[in-house]
Amino acid sequence: MKLIIQIPCFNEEKTLPATVADIPREIEGIDRVEILVIDDGSTDRTVEVAKGLGVEHIIRNKGNKGLAFSFISGLNTCLKLGADIIVNTDGDNQYKGEFIPRLIAPILSGEADIVVGDRKTDHIGHFSPVKKRLQKLGSLVVRLLSKTDVPDAVSGFRAFSRDAAMRTNIVSAYSYTVETIIQAGNKKLTVKSVPVETNPQTRPSRLMKSMPRFIMNQLNTMVRMYTMFKPMRVFFIIGFFCLFAAMIPLARFLIYYFMGMGEGHIQSLIFGAILFIIGFQVMVIALLGDVISFNRKLVEETLYRVKRMEFDYVKGKQDGPEQTRNQGGAEDENPL
């Protein structure tokens, strides 16, 4: 049983040593623990520091691609390296490595496909009251959209089984946290949460450069993901309200028409007709979206099977002589 802890990094030369040092190298139920550093175009000495720390694997993005790209790049690399369980943590040493055994325990026991660390944001000192309320509200919305029970939806401290990692596909360019939970819930993967603790803040969050921008990006991800999985429901509701709204001006026109005053209320007929046409078109879009969604499921299932053949074949080769393993801070080629 191999566990790989992936650490996306962008200019983390100061915090990476503490992050790596905090990671336990011996865990009950795990035969091998390895570390993968994903360098997202750092301009400081992050890569040199990682090599000096002796991490087993390093991949480098050609330029700053963003957290979502680095996350999925790391996930695919971990699969290629034969990981049975993958843990994602931050390079700023936000999460305490001592909680990794607790994080992976539900996967080891077969109770979960994905486990998310609950930071208990109510008790984090450097979170403002507004941020705490927004975290609660956002997590509530994600729970409703994904039908999961995750109290801290934007926590980056999470573990994936090998199968769940193969089924994860990121389309957002911003972040992966909300998207992976909504995807997992709609793909019927079992998502659990365990309480974890965090270290004192080492630097301001790079994702939350401004509160309004963070909220808009997360809302955009939520709406996009839910629409991708439930297009019929989303567009049907919109179309239904348009058709219902169309009935009001149309009924007004008909009332005046039968009273012999229809000529003076032709604007109600036009407005109602426009709303009716819009509603009908949206209903057609709902049907088309449902067909596209079904096709997407077929494509994702095909992609999953291709990944299984590719990564399981590589893993089978690695279970033999481990001559392809990259020890002592060598760099792996970025597979994406």
Image (cartoon, rainbow, N blue to C red):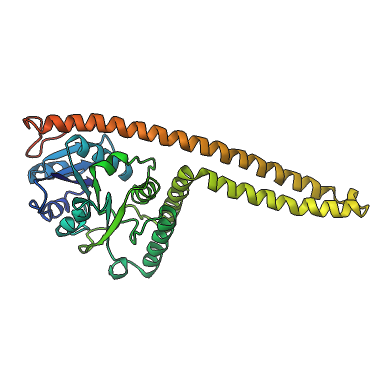
Q: Residue furthest right?
A: 260
- Taking the spot 70% from the left edge, 53% from the top edge, the residue there is 245
Q: Is residue 274 visible?
A: yes
Q: Is residue 300 left or right of residue 163?
A: right
| Nearer-the-camera pick, 55 or 114 | 114
Q: Classify the position of the C terminus by image quarter.
A: top left
Q: Is residue 65 visible?
A: no
Q: Picture quarter containing residue 187?
A: top left
Percent position (x, y) of residue 125?
A: 28, 69
Q: Is residue 251 left or right of residue 31?
A: right
Count of numbered circles in the view? 0
Percent position (x, y) of residue 159?
A: 24, 50
| Nearer-the-camera pick, 193 or 130 | 193
- Taking the spot 19% from the left edge, 29% from the top edge, the residue there is 313
Percent position (x, y) of residue 3?
A: 15, 46
Q: Is residue 275 above or below residue 317?
A: below
Percent position (x, y) of residue 56?
A: 11, 40
Q: Is residue 283 above or below residue 196?
A: above
Q: Classify the position of the N terminus by image quarter.
A: top left
| Nearer-the-camera pick, 157 or 8 | 157
Q: Is residue 49 above or below residue 302?
A: below
Q: Is residue 312 left or right of residue 243?
A: left
Q: Picture quarter containing residue 140?
A: bottom left
- Taking the spot 24% from the left edge, 40% from the top edge, the residue there is 74
Q: Residue furthest front?
A: 110
- Taking the spot 10% from the left edge, 30% from the top edge, the residue there is 324
| Nearer-the-camera pick, 218 or 289 | 289
